[in-house]
Image (spheres, coloured by chain):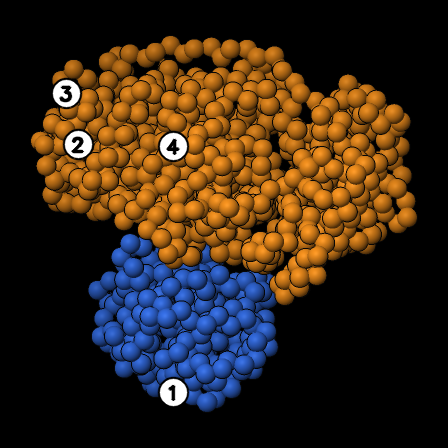
Chain colours: A orange, B blue
Amino acid sequence: MQEVNQQLARDFGLSSEEYSRVLSIMGRTPSLTELGVFSVMWSEHCSYKSSRVWLKQLPTKQPWVIHGPGENAGVVDIGDGLAAIFKMESHNHPSFIEPYQGAATGVGGILRDVFTMGARPIANLNALRFGSPNHPATKRIVDGVVRGIGGYGNCVGVPTVGGEINFHPAYNGNPLVNAMTVGIARKDKIFLSAAAGIGNPVVYVGSKTGRDGIHGATMASAEFAADSEEKRPTVQVGDPFTEKLLIEACLELMATDAIVAIQDMGAAGLTSSSVEMAGKGGVGIALNLDMVPARETEMSAYEFMLSESQERMLMVLRPDRQEMARGIFEKWDLDFAVIGELTDTGRLTVHYQGQLEADIPLAPLNDQAPLYTRPTIEPPKREKLNSARLEDRIGLTGALRKLIACPDLCSRAWVWDQYDATVGGQTVKRPGAADAAVVKLEGLSRGLALTTDCTPRYCLADPELGGAQAVVEAWRNLTAVGARPLAITDNMNFGNPEKPEIMGQFAAAIRGMASACEALSFPVVSGNVSLYNETEGRAILPTPAIGGLGVLDDVTKAVGLALPPWLDLVLIGTTVGWLGQSLWLREVTGREDGAPPPVDLAIERINGDFVRSRILDGTIRACHDVSDGGVLVAIAEMAMASGVGVRLVTHPRDVPGHAFWFGEDQARYLIAVPDSASFIRSADTAGVPAMRIGTSGGRDLTLPDGGTISVEELRELHEGFFPTWMNPATEAKN
Amino acid sequence: MKAGIVIFPGINRERDMAIALKQSTGYAPRMIWHKETDLGDLDMVVIPGGFSFGDYLRCGAMAARSPVMRAIHDHAARGGYILGVCNGFQILTEADLLPGALLRNASLRFLSMDCHLRVERGDTVFTSRYQAGSTFRAVLAHGDGNYFADDATLDRLENEGLVAFRYATPAGAVTPEANLNGSARSIAGILSPNRRILGLMPHPEDLVDPLMGGTGGKPLFDSIAAA
């Protein structure tokens, strides 16, 4: 038996000040199990101790928000008596250590957060950031993460409909795997986690408990060193088949009136689920670990409480419904065990093999959790680049060829083609078909639009602007399919919060996000914070990934980006030719500098509201927001999606050619309409800048400087990177 | 034709299948749990896609030994109709109701994409609304769809006209490039000798509505409805 002392507390991730607080709450030296409970509940991962003070600044309310942050997932009213329940969560650290299981269990965990509230999951998305393709570890991590996401999502039968991928050397030692799930429930049948009813049974369902994932939450709250490989035992192993059974069994039980409260066992397993359920309900909870279904023998109380074995849920049931509930879980061949009851003691007690292993007062465990206002340093502003002084050495076609083939802009089909995007039969816009995925609600005319967005290089250069830009890009992508943006979930991925520069990035990103959410009536309803994303002292790019959700009252109105022939192509928004932090700058000149393009929230709203209204009235036949790579890349993407070419007209004389075609000015969309003249007149009336920049047709992209490139060649360049990089055998064959 | 859908634990395309059947037949199919042993008065048993029992053993091997399979064997012996799609096809081969096996895709990766199927015969209860030789687009979503059988079995399937569908180009050419999973002789679907059992890997049920990108699979369900 290990002796509990300050050294062990430090090994468990508690500072000496935090350990003193434990001693004062307990009034004695805690047992090993008690120390385990405190250390995981007070870990960064579970307590948000460094981020909570900042997260409070985010707008979380709108009339359509049913439940904001604080529940397992966010809940918004989407009409027809239905609610969308959604959240994004990181599984960064496990995915670096063991990419397949790390990513797979990330998908499993976020699914549980959503169906635990009563929703049938209808879509998954994922936001991924990997190291440089040239780094020796990257290929293995990409392969494992993609297989893991597919392996889990395909098996549970939830379509993976969207997401994003970036590469940057800053993620070499610390990839980001952010998984998002969206589910649908009746809005009068939402299940919450606050326990109630003294004497009510506490029921464990799902998989058996093993020794996997012990102290996963603590591992996720520390930096990596060179010995990270040794942390593999803290990574959990996923079983998507059991998850599928758990979804069906829980939804079947949720159709009855048996459940008082329910929570999945995620990070910190039985500890966090029992402590949070009892804490929220203001009751005590008594657990008897002898009753917990175990996969391994001779497990200790400490191991039971800290295990992060997957596919487990904790419920408080009405006692008179216990046997009916047992019948449902037995039908699905899942374990069902009464492992305790609610008490009026206000304490967590844990008995095992006749011994009292833990006896902790819940109020101070929750209320006295550490909360830090860590020092911040305001991130320095970058110098604005003068686009006119940046020499264009390779011309428009040369730059276009380079950009559409580069890892950050090339086709992701190799990845999507491994994710089942159609199961359920409701996928209206699959990955790559539109700026946001569109999923119909079975049996209804309504649909949801879903996206994930963040531009980490903007966030590094200016975290406040980058935070705002991530939110507006999500809003724009939802708008570009015709959806009314409703709300976001955020996944804040940053470095070590104990460094003032990192905390400064975090605070600034929150400021930017808050202002954008406010201006666009686009509140945050759920989220997750992942800190300590550093390896050997090097932090990742600040990455506040945004998952956006919008609604289409009539899903048949949704438009994609595939360009039909013989239409006018119109550019909405103002182009000054902003090349600072652009991909043109990075890929063509090798520079990653300058200030990123400014975000004007009022203009975003005006331009976006106009575009959406013209999609919904049927005028706009195809739409694509202009983001990474600028206008010419966006045009090429529209052309490649349909195989139809474009003849472009001359650009305005007051902007240099390369700056006009590759600048990344915000608040812009490309749209295709039959009659640009009348469309531009209506845009003028609405105060929205619009200019015709080309006509679709043929099989070539013809540039105003006379350069021509066939859509076929564009596709070959665009689709080459992933298969060639991942599979050298194919490369040899071709 | 009265159809029912069998659900094994881990099956996940039963809703897609029910939607497609209902659209063509006008009624919701009965859902049959794998522990049931009585199929009632069903004319057609449909086994949809998914990961029965997690596919932790060979795909379909556990489901092929589920309680409901005895009734399905009896149904087949009586000349009843059976449609198995994806995991359903794998289950039918594991249950020896169709010959051959479905191996890992040649790429060793899960594949989720559209494919084109050439209709090899238009005179079965499953294909009467297709023209023989025509092609249609369907969704493919599997990790183990690489059809394999020994040469004698393949020759017999061909000689007896039991190949239902082959992977092809949109124009109907059977090429190695169009054979996405590496199946023997590009076979995507096969029939039993009485042509009342069909197994196929791609999902016609996911393209029966223009909103989802196409209606290539709809004639298959219209054929069933008309029978």
Question: Is residue A623 rendered to the left or right of residue A314?
Answer: left
Question: Is residue A55 rendered to the left or right of residue A512?
Answer: right
> Dot 3 surroundings within 10 Å: few (below 14), some, or many (20 or more)?
few
Q: Amino acid at mark 3?
A: Pro
Residue B204 visible (yes or no): yes
Quarter of the figure with the N terminus of chain A:
top right
**Up-down relation of residue B31 to residue A589 (above or below):** below
Q: Which residue is mark 1?
A: B194
Q: CA distance from mark 4 to mark 1?
A: 55 Å
Q: Amino acid at mark 1?
A: Asn
Residue A722 in which image quadrant: top left
Of discs 4 and 1, which sits in the foreground?
Answer: 4
Q: Nearer the viewer, residue B143 or B27?
A: B27
Q: Secondary structure at mark 1?
A: loop
Q: Nearer the viewer, residue A60 or B35?
A: A60
Residue A716 in which image quadrant: top left
Q: Secondary structure at mark 2?
A: strand
Q: CA distance from mark 1 to mark 2?
A: 59 Å
Q: Amino acid at mark 4?
A: Ala
Q: CA distance from mark 2 to mark 3?
A: 14 Å
Q: Which residue is mark 2?
A: A570
Q: Are marks 4 and 2 in contact (CB under 8 Å)?
A: no
Lower position in the chain sequence, tag 4 or tag 2:
4
Q: Which residue is mark 3?
A: A652
Q: Which residue is mark 4?
A: A474
Of discs 2 and 3, which sits in the foreground?
Answer: 2
Q: CA distance from mark 1 to mark 3?
A: 70 Å
